[in-house]
Image (spheres, rainbow, N blue to C red):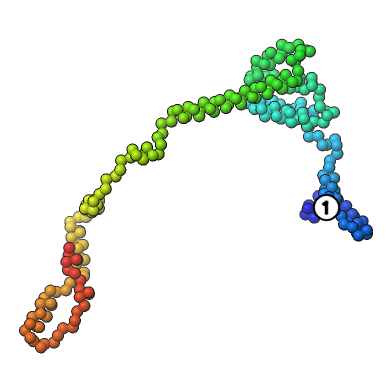
C-alpha cells in the first residue's frame, strides 16, 4: 500500500526506511502494526479542523419546505451533533434559531401559532418542544402515506375485473378441425385464379416436356414375337425409366 500510494506516502516511506535500518542493526524487523500506526498518524488532522460543522453552518442553513420536513430535520441534527462542543450554541439559542427557520411553515401552522402564545419562561417554550413537534409531524406524515397506499391497494383489488388465465382460455372457442378434403379445397380457393386455364395449361406443358413412351412399341414387339419372326430383337428397356403417363396427365 505504501509503495503504490506515490507521493502521498513519501513521509511514511521515509520513516519506514529509517526504522528498517534501525531494526537491522539489532537483527530485528519492523512489524506490520507499526506500519499501520504510521499510516494512521499520517492521516491525522489537527484537532481544530476535525469538526465538520460550526455555528456558521447552522445559521446559514435554510428550511427545505414542508414536503421535505424529514430531510430538514435529519440535516439539522447532523449539523448540531457534529459541531465542536465549544462552538455548540445553548439550548435557548438553538430553540430561537430553529423557530426562525420553521415559523412560516403551513404544515405546522397550528402548533407554531400556539407556540407564539407562550411567554418567555413558559415550561413548553423550549427547544425540546420544537423537536418533538417536528418529529410528530414526520410520524403522522408517514402514517398518512401508508394509509393512502393501503387504500389504493384495496381499491385496485376491488375494482379489478380481469379474470384468471384459466377462465379466459376456457371462454375462447376452439377452432373446428378440418378434414383433408376441406383443407385441399381451402388451399385451392385461396390461390389467385390465373387468366384462362393456366393450371390445365401447366399440366399439358409438363406432360409435353417429359417424354412419354409410345404404347405401339410394346404392341409391335408382341406382334413380331407372335409371328415367329426371327428379325432383329430390340434391346431390353428398363421399365423403371419409363414415365407413367397416368401420373403426369392426372
**Residue pointed to by mark 1:** 32
- At horizontal 83% and vertical 36% (from top left) the residue drawn is 49
Above or below: residue 15 compared with residue 52 = below
Q: Does 65 sit left or right of 232 as displayed?
A: right
Q: Residue furthest left?
A: 227
Relative image position of residue 205 (x, y in whole percent): 20, 65
Corner quadrant of residue 212: bottom left
Relative image position of residue 197 (x, y in whole percent): 18, 57
Q: Please rate how many residues cluster around mark 1, counting C-alpha atoms within 10 Å: few if below 14, some from 14 to 19, many from 20.
A: few
Q: Does 243 sit left or right of 144 as displayed?
A: left
Q: Does 211 sit left or right of 149 as displayed?
A: left
User: 111 or 123: nearer the eye?
Assistant: 123
Corner quadrant of residue 78: top right
Q: Is residue 143 visible?
A: yes
Q: Is residue 189 visible?
A: no
Corner quadrant of residue 208: bottom left
Placement of the C terminus among the 4 image quadrants:
bottom left
Amino acid at each position: 500500500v505504501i509503495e503504490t500510494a506515490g507521493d502521498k506516502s513519501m513521509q511514511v516511506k521515509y520513516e519506514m526506511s529509517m526504522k528498517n535500518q534501525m531494526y537491522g542493526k539489532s537483527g530485528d524487523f519492523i512489524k506490520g502494526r507499526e506500519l499501520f500506526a504510521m499510516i494512521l498518524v499520517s492521516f491525522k488532522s489537527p484537532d481544530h479542523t476535525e469538526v465538520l460543522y460550526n455555528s456558521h453552518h447552522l445559521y446559514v442553513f435554510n428550511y427545505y419546505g414542508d414536503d421535505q420536513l424529514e430531510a430538514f430535520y435529519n440535516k439539522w441534527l447532523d449539523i448540531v451533533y457534529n459541531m465542536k462542543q465549544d462552538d455548540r450554541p445553548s439550548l435557548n439559542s438553538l430553540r430561537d434559531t430553529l423557530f426562525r427557520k420553521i415559523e412560516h411553515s403551513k404544515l405546522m401552522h397550528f402548533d407554531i401559532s400556539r407556540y407564539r402564545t407562550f411567554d418567555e419562561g413558559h415550561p413548553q417554550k423550549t427547544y425540546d418542544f420544537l423537536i418533538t413537534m417536528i418529529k410528530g409531524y414526520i410520524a403522522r406524515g408517514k402514517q398518512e402515506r401508508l394509509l393512502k397506499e393501503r387504500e389504493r391497494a384495496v381499491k385496485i383489488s376491488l375494482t379489478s375485473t380481469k379474470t384468471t388465465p384459466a377462465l379466459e382460455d376456457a371462454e375462447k372457442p376452439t377452432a373446428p378441425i378440418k378434414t383433408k378434403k376441406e383443407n385441399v379445397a381451402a388451399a385451392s380457393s385461396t390461390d389467385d385464379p390465373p387468366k384462362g386455364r393456366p393450371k390445365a395449361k401447366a399440366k399439358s406443358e409438363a406432360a409435353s416436356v417429359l417424354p412419354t413412351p409410345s404404347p405401339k412399341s410394346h404392341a409391335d414387339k408382341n406382334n413380331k414375337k407372335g409371328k415367329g419372326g426371327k428379325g432383329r430383337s430390340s434391346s431390353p428397356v428398363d421399365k423403371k425409366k419409363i414415365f407413367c403417363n397416368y401420373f403426369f396427365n392426372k
